[in-house]
Amino acid sequence: MQIQTTKAIETEQIGEALGRNLRGGEVIELVGDLGSGKTTFTRGLARGIGSLDNVSSPTFTISKVYKSKPLEIHHFDLYRLQEAGLIEHELAEIADDDNSVIVVEWAEIAAHVLPKKRLIINFSHTGEDQRTLNFSFSKNLEYLVKNLPGT
Ligand code: ADP
Ligand code: MG
């Protein structure tokens, strides 16, 4: 499945719609170059679960949490991480929590501890303000992409 956006707000709105479909326990991997819209999308996800927390790339802090009730989003950016080490335990613990959702940018270093059943979204910069989002997921996660704008 593929969606194109032509403004940052549209990418955020797709995130918001997907955020409303979250049930807890999901893992979402965001793949794409710097500036391709991964954090913009995550801002929408946070709004979609009803969180008003400030969303920004956790490049220096590795992770941030956006809280709402009952769900919370744990947003990871593993770009600067040299080895998966402690993060593996943290990811595994959060993955066991039914009210938590994991969103990971630059997941490569920890990909081996992420569940196979995850939603992977590939972001590509296809024009100045155009981004193309490609969704891949197993059948049991189809509910996540219901009613997204542009589909
Ligand atoms: P990443 O997390 O992938 O590095 P960001 O979401 O932080 O990317 O940055 C994306 C940048 O591109 C923002 O400055 C945003 O305003 C801009 N932008 C322009 N068009 C779009 C679009 N269609 N979708 C998402 N971001 C866009
Ligand atoms: Mg980012």
Image (spheres, rainbow, N blue to C red):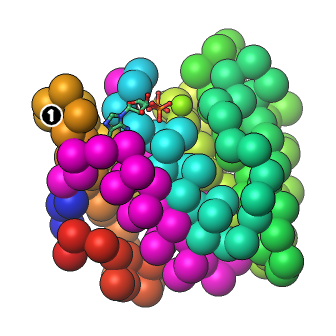
- Examine the rendering and report whether any part of residue 88 can be seen: no
For ligand 2, give the image quadrant.
Answer: top right
The image quadrant of residue 63 is top right
Name the residue that disc number 1 marks: 126
State yes or no: residue 107 in magenta.
no
Q: Secondary structure at mark 1?
A: loop
Q: Is residue 58 above or below residue 30?
A: above
Query: Which sits in the foreground, 119 or 73?
Result: 73
Query: Which sits in the foreground, 39 or 102?
Result: 39
Query: Which sits in the foreground, 116 or 23?
Result: 23
- Examine the rendering and report whether any part of residue 43 can be seen: yes
The residue depicted at 43 percent of the width and 86 percent of the height is 143
The residue depicted at 14 percent of the width and 31 percent of the height is 127
x, y percent for residue 90: 84, 45
Give the magenta part as a residue range.
Answer: 4-33
Q: Is residue 119 above or below residue 104?
A: below
The image quadrant of residue 55 is top right
The residue depicted at 69 percent of the width and 64 percent of the height is 101
Number of other residues with Cα within 10 Å of mark 1, as a class: few under 14, some 14 to 19, many 20 or more: some
x, y percent for residue 65: 81, 49
Which amino acid type corresponds to the residue marked 1 in the rendered image? Answer: Thr
Q: Is residue 143 above or below residue 30?
A: below
Q: Is residue 34 above or below residue 145?
A: above
Horizontal arrangement in the rendering, residue 36 relative to residue 113 (left or right) = left
